[in-house]
Image (spheres, rainbow, N blue to C red):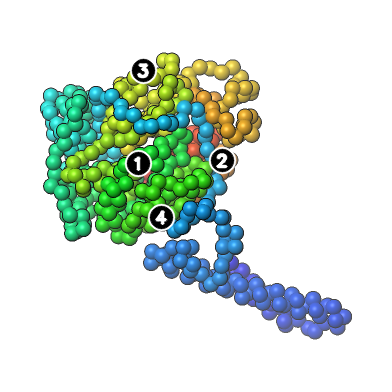
Amino acid sequence: MNKRTITLSLTFLAQILSAEPSTASSGSGILLYSVVAVCAVLVVWAMLSLAGNLLKIEASKYGMDPEKNGIGIFPGVKDFFKPAKPGYINDGSFHLLTKGHDIKLAGEASGDIKPAHVTRFGINPKDFHGMSPIPKVILETGAEVKAGDILFYDKKRPEIMYAAPVSGEVVEIRRGEKRSIDEIVILADKTIKYKKFKIIDINKADRNEIVTFMLETGLWTLINERPFDVVPDIDSVPVNIFVSTFDTAPLAIDYNKVISGNEAVFQAGLDVLSKLTKRKVHFALASTGTTAPSSAFTNAMGAEKHWFKGPHPAGNVGIHIHHIAPIKGQDKVWTLGVQEVVTIGKMILTGEYHADRVVALTGSQLNNAGYVRTYQGAGLGDLLKNNLIGENNRVVSGDVLSGTKSSLDGFLGFRDDQVTVLKEGNEYELLGWLLPLTPRPSISGTIPSYGSDTKFEANTNTHGEKRAFVVSGQYESVLPMDIYPQHLMKAIITNNIEKMEALGLAELTEEDVALCEFVCTSKNPVQSILRQGLDSLKEQL
């Protein structure tokens, strides 16, 4: 309740009290005093509400979480209707998200983790936003490298160097338009050799020593900084660091499998991160199942735990940031995945750059969807060899919502741990918009649901083309954030920098609005529009 409401209530109360005494019956007097009492209660409640809101605003300025710390004059309505937490949650905050949508596709990975027989690995400089298109490549074709040797660095920031994920021979440097570098390809050794680095004592080292160590070993490039999704500058100090231990995207990898056997190195990685932030390392865990996640997550130390339950995008780190400690002003936060934390931990314990990755091979066009162990930048042709159904397929590095279109000649993205293969939707469906007979995932009520457990064999056909960009409320229905995404997209299209910043652009990245693009009736490329806005905003800073 604002000041205007309080003023109106006081005015109304004063008018009642100044009115001439009524000569009506006693019933009218009771009614008068009842109205006076109600107005008095409203005034007191309004003043207390205003005071409570001011307390919360002041607490937020000092980095305190008003909800978690119970700051306020009296409990809010939400406090009386808090959702029941699963029994295995003993500590940490609990967040129940209702907005979103789970896309259930056929081809989920299952079974044990098997070794992948991959011979070629590639690192693509274009996986890193803001890098110059032609970075400085240190090694020429034919050079021998060890895992951890520096391959290239950004000419804009030469102190940030990018390491080789495997040992072997540099066999190819692929170039694109204007001689930009697309991939640096390594033919891997059968047995990986590692460059040895001097181990530092994480308990005694200060922040500057840790930063220098991470720069020299290539670990720094594992960090993603928001806003803008870039590798941070060497003098950047994050307000908070966020690590998500689960993913809700279609056919996403199960990190409980990934972490098995890596509990100690994961904790070592968290110990490193705790020394790099001003405040806290925030740790997001899934509470969707009946059983608790891996003990490596639930027993992790040095991080503040937060539990999330809800449909996709409940597993996105951007959603976690928004509900735990939103990005404000000039704040910078860092995000890392589970496997990046493991790589950092292995370096701290062994002095070697272990870029091994567990990858989920998923999709309806695979004979055997499952988990494989390989290394960062693995060749997709080797990963999918003898496992494809048919030839007219789309190979995606990542998930179907926010992944990157690739080919069998391409490589796994730098931060990807999933490969999805689905049918290429380049066949025309007669009257498909009028008679949607083929089962397909959709939030529209005009498409039969076929039951909640149905898993669809979807293709890439968008079933339409770009249309008028009208306000429909669809985006808001699947984005559990206090943001108006459709208004934001229009501000980006019109290049209104002030408006797009005010509407919360800095809080978002492509994966956060990927579901908005899926539900978009207007068929707009929402993710690319968002990146356009982020690039424009970054240029103004």
> Residue type at mark 4?
Lys
Front label number (2 vs 1): 1
Q: Which mark is residue 521?
A: none
Q: What residue did someone put label 3 on?
A: 386
Front label number (3 vs 2): 3
**Residue appearing at x 36%, y 51% in the figure:** 242
Question: How far, Cα to Cα, is label 3 from label 1?
Answer: 28 Å
Question: How far, Cα to Cα, is label 4 from label 1?
Answer: 20 Å
Q: Position of residue 190 (x, y in %)?
A: 20, 26
Question: How far, Cα to Cα, is label 3 from label 4?
Answer: 42 Å
> Residue type at mark 1?
Ser
**Residue appearing at x 50%, y 30% in the figure:** 105
> Residue type at mark 2?
Gln
Crowd band around label 3 with a 10 angstrom C-alpha radius: few (<14), some (14–19), many (20+): few
Front residue of this view, candidates 529 and 89: 89
Label 4–label 2 contact, CB within 8 A: no
Question: How far, Cα to Cα, is label 4 from label 2?
Answer: 31 Å
Q: What residue did someone put label 4 on?
A: 305
Label 4–label 1 contact, CB within 8 A: no
Front residue of this view, candidates 212 and 19: 212
Q: Which numbered disc flags the more N-terminal residue, 3 or 4? A: 4
Front residue of this view, candidates 445 and 188: 188
> Residue type at mark 3?
Asn
Front label number (4 vs 2): 4
Crowd band around label 2 with a 10 angstrom C-alpha radius: few (<14), some (14–19), many (20+): some
The quadrant where residue 5 appears: bottom right
* Residue 141 in the figure: left or right of residue 455: left
Q: What residue did someone put label 2 on?
A: 474
**Residue appearing at x 16%, y 52% in the figure:** 200
Q: What residue did someone put label 1 on?
A: 260
Q: Which numbered disc flags the more N-terminal residue, 3 or 1? A: 1
